[in-house]
Image (cartoon, rainbow, N blue to C red):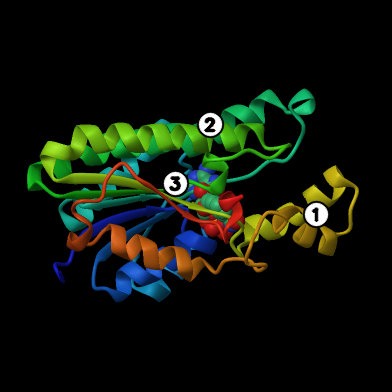
Amino acid sequence: DNTPRIAVVTGTSSGIGAAVVKGLCAQGHQVLAVDFNAKGKEVAEAAGAAFYQADLSDAESCRGAIDEAVKRFGGVDILINNAGIQHVESIEAFPEAKWRQIIDLMLTAPFLLTQAAWPHMRKRGWGRIVNIASIHAQVASPGKAAYISAKHGLIGLTKTAALEGGEQGITANAICPAYVKTPLVENQIADQAKLNHMDEQEVIEKVMLKNAAIKRLIDPEEVAVLVAYLISDAAGAVTGSSFNIDLGWTAH
Ligand code: NAD
């Protein structure tokens, strides 16, 4: 199960994406890390990955990312859709432009990247798609209409890709984490404090870990380990599934 593969990972300058890139490189895969933040270059190269700077809320940039991997490495075997952002505001006040940006980046981009990578996976009769969704692909919380809608949609895309890929050696699965220790969550604590009229420590304990049986944040590496399994040959029978890493949140 040591065949070196070609992987495209999105949203790699920090957090889960950076941990996934590190893990894939350590396993000997060729990795193209894609991010709109120029800081991603340093992070990618330190892990041994190549870097492509692109704003994935733009359709041409999505296709450009796959083209770059094909030009550089000769194909695409693995696609990890991970880039994401958050915006916390009630539906009543939610800006339409933010809604569209989140849907473009977190639902349309994974679709376009899957579409562009598909012929390359089909040609080899082997492919792995892992969509980093969220526990907010399974349940909702107030103030996150766009994020939750995009993530629920991503599960639909995952299941459809699984059905279409079944005869072609392509699997598609989703990972649904609760709160992971990343800049995305750190930035959110302040917003949540405002929304809930709490201080930041209260947000962590009473909002973020309210439903958690295990009262701690998740490490990005804990997500990367599941990615490593899902892209392996050993996971060839696993497709169309969502895997919660949610500290027991949805056991309620
Ligand atoms: P993060 O902010 O550390 O990483 C997100 C990455 O996406 C960053 O590198 C950022 O530069 C990149 N990005 C943002 N907009 C982009 C764009 N337009 N084009 C290209 N790249 C862009 O956040 P994270 O927590 O590591 O999040 C990664 C994924 O995991 C997201 O999809 C997020 O929804 C999901 N997730 C996170 C948590 C959590 O608690 N942190 C929980 C569940 C799911």
Residue 190, label in figure? 1
Decide: marks 2, 3 in contact (CB < 8 A)?
Answer: no
**Residue holding disc 2:** 103
Q: Earlier in the sequence, mark 1 or mark 2?
A: 2
Structural distance between the alpha carbons of marks 2 and 3: 17 Å
> Label 1 sits on what residue type?
Ala
Q: Nearer the viewer, residue 44 or 4?
A: 4
Is residue 155 left or right of 119 when viewed as pictured?
right
Q: Is residue 99 left or right of residue 193?
A: left
Residue type at tag 3: Ala
* Gap between marks 1 and 3 measured at Cα: 28 Å
- Amino acid identity at mark 2: Ile
The picture places residue 152, in percent across and down from the top left corner, at 50, 35
Is ligand 1 less than 8 Å from the beta carbon at label 3? yes
The front one of 229 and 41 is: 229
Of labels 1 and 3, the one closer to you:
1
Q: Is residue 57 visible?
A: no
x, y percent for residue 100: 58, 27
Give the left or right position of residue 45, taking residue 85 as reference.
left
Whether label 1 touches label 2, CB < 8 Å: no
Q: Residue at x 33, y 39 (%)?
A: 113
Give the image location of residue 64, x and y in percent.
33, 41
Q: Nearer the viewer, mark 2 or mark 3?
A: 2
Q: Quadrant of residue 184?
A: bottom right
- Can see residue 158? yes
For marks 1 and 2, give the CA distance: 23 Å
* Of callouts 2 and 3, the N-terminal one: 3
Q: Nearer the viewer, residue 169 or 41?
A: 169
Residues at badges 1 and 3 in contact (C-beta under 8 Å)? no
The residue where tag 3 is placed is: 54
Secondary element under disc 3, as helix, strand or loop, is loop
The residue shown at (17%, 60%) is: 233
